[in-house]
Amino acid sequence: MWAWLRLNSLFGLTCGLLWLCPVLGGPCPDSQKLLKQLKDMAKRDFFEAFARNQGLHLAPFPEICKRTPDFFPTEKTLRELPAVAFLQNVNDTLYLLEERLEKNVFKDLVSFISGINNNVCCLLQTLSAAPLACSTPESKGTVSTPDKGSLRWKTERCQMIWGYQRFMQAVERVLETWPPSPRRSNRNSRSLLRALLEQRKPGRAG
C-alpha cells in the first residue's frame, strides 16, 4: 500500500506542474502554446518510478519491461501521417492505453494522459478539415487483467508505461518537425495552419 501511495504522490506532483485539464468547452490556448505543452509533457518520465516501486529495476526485468506492446504505432508510421491523421492517431493510442490502466491504481498517470489528449484535441481544432471533436476509438474488446501485484501484472504494466514513453518521445520528435511560430519577427514565416494545409494539399492537375 505504501508503494502505491508513493507512486501516486509522485504522479500527482508531476501532473501539478503542467496545465492538464482545461474546462470542458472552454477556450484552448493558441497552437504554439499547445505545441510547447505537448513537447514538455512528452518528456515526463513515469517508467523509472514504477519500475523501482515494483522491484523491476533489477535484472532481468529491465529487458522484459522494454518490450513495447503492439498497439503503439512506430515512429515511422507517425511520420508518414498527415497532420490531422497524426493527431487523431495520438488521441486513439492514448485512449486505448487509458483503457488498459486501472484508474484506481494509476489515477494520476491516467489524468496526465487525459491532459495530453485535451491538448491534442485543442490542437486538432486549429486544423482545417478536422472533426468537430476528438473521436473515441472502438474498444479492442475485453482485456484480460491478471491479479494486481502478480508478476505478470507488474511486467504487463511496466511494458505499457515503457511503450507509452517511447511513443511520446516519437510524438515529440514529429512535433519538432512542424513549422515555427508565426509570431516570430520574420515577416516571411508562414503560419502553422497555412504550412500544414500546404503539406496536405494535393497537386492540381495540369
Image (tube, grey):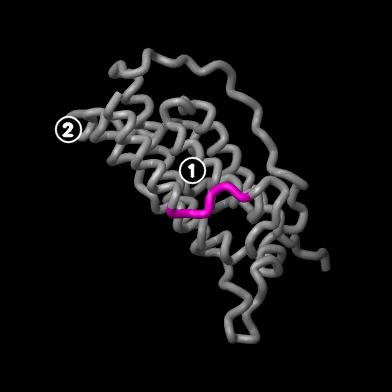
Q: Which quadrant is the N terminus positioned in?
A: top left
Q: Residue at x 43, y 40 (%)?
A: 164
Q: Residue at x 69, y 66 (%)?
A: 193
Q: Is residue 132 above or below residue 7?
A: below
Q: Quadrant of residue 46?
A: top left
Q: Does 204 sit above or below residue 8?
A: below
Q: Quadrant of residue 49?
A: top left
Range shown magenta: 17-22
Helix, strand or loop under label 1: helix
Percent of width and height locating residue 68? 39, 34
Identity, as a three-letter code, of the amino acid under mark 2: Leu
Q: Is residue 135 above or below residue 178?
A: above
Residue of label 2: 58
Q: Quadrant of the C terminus?
A: bottom right
The residue that appears at 63% across and 45% down in the rendered structure is: 88
Indicate the position of residue 133 as horizontal and vertical percent values: 73, 44
Label 2 sits on a secondary structure element that is loop
User: As drawn, is 92 to the left or to the right of 205?
Assistant: left
Secondary structure mostly seen in the magenta stretch:
loop
Q: Three-letter amino acid code at disc 1?
A: Phe
Judge whether residue 20 is colored magenta.
Answer: yes
Viewer-side label of 1, 2: 1
Q: Which mark is residue 112?
A: 1
- Residue 14: in magenta span: no
Instruction: Point out residue 33 in the picture as x, y percentages from the top left corner.
Output: 57, 64
